[in-house]
């Protein structure tokens, strides 16, 4: 593959490493640079937390809702 990471943010060929970084974008869509980065970070967080839950990990904190 030409990509460095898969859709779960895991690096190909390396175990137990995930990359959540702006460099994974070939081109940042749109004018506002921060919006796609926030979206990617939220998606990565959801993906990593879902994976951790399947491994039996439970968070020690309770995320709070927005303001």
Image (cartoon, grey):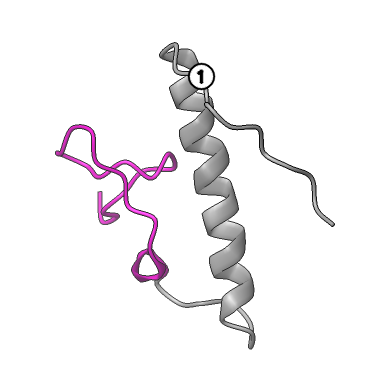
Q: Is residue 6 magenta?
A: yes
Q: Is residue 11 left or right of residue 41?
A: left
Q: Residue furthest bottom?
A: 31
Specify the farthest residue to the left: 13
- Observer-nearest of 43 and 61: 61
Going by the picture, which residue comes out furthest to the right?
67
**Residue picked out by circle 1:** 58
Q: Which stretch appears magenta?
A: 1-25
Query: Is 24 on the left or on the right of 43, as rendered?
Result: left
Vertical position of residue 21 compared to residue 64: above or below: below
Q: Is residue 20 magenta?
A: yes
Q: Mainly helix, strand or loop, the magenta region?
A: loop
Left or right? Give the position of 51 relative to 33: left
| Residue positioned 47% across, 14% down in the render | 54
- Secondary structure, mark 1, is loop
Residue 8: quarter of image? top left
What percent of the width, then of the height, locates residue 21? 38, 63
Placement of the C terminus among the 4 image quadrants:
bottom right
Measured as percent of width and height from the top left, residue 6 is found at: 36, 43
The quarter holding residue 18 reads top left
């Amino acid at each position: 593959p030409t990509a460095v990471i898969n859709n779960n943010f895991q690096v190909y060929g390396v175990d137990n490493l995930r990359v959540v970084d702006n460099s994974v974008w070939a081109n940042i869509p749109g004018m506002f640079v921060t919006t796609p980065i926030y979206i990617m970070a939220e998606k990565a967080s959801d993906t990593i937390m879902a994976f951790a839950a399947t491994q039996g990990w439970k968070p020690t904190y309770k995320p709070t809702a927005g303001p």
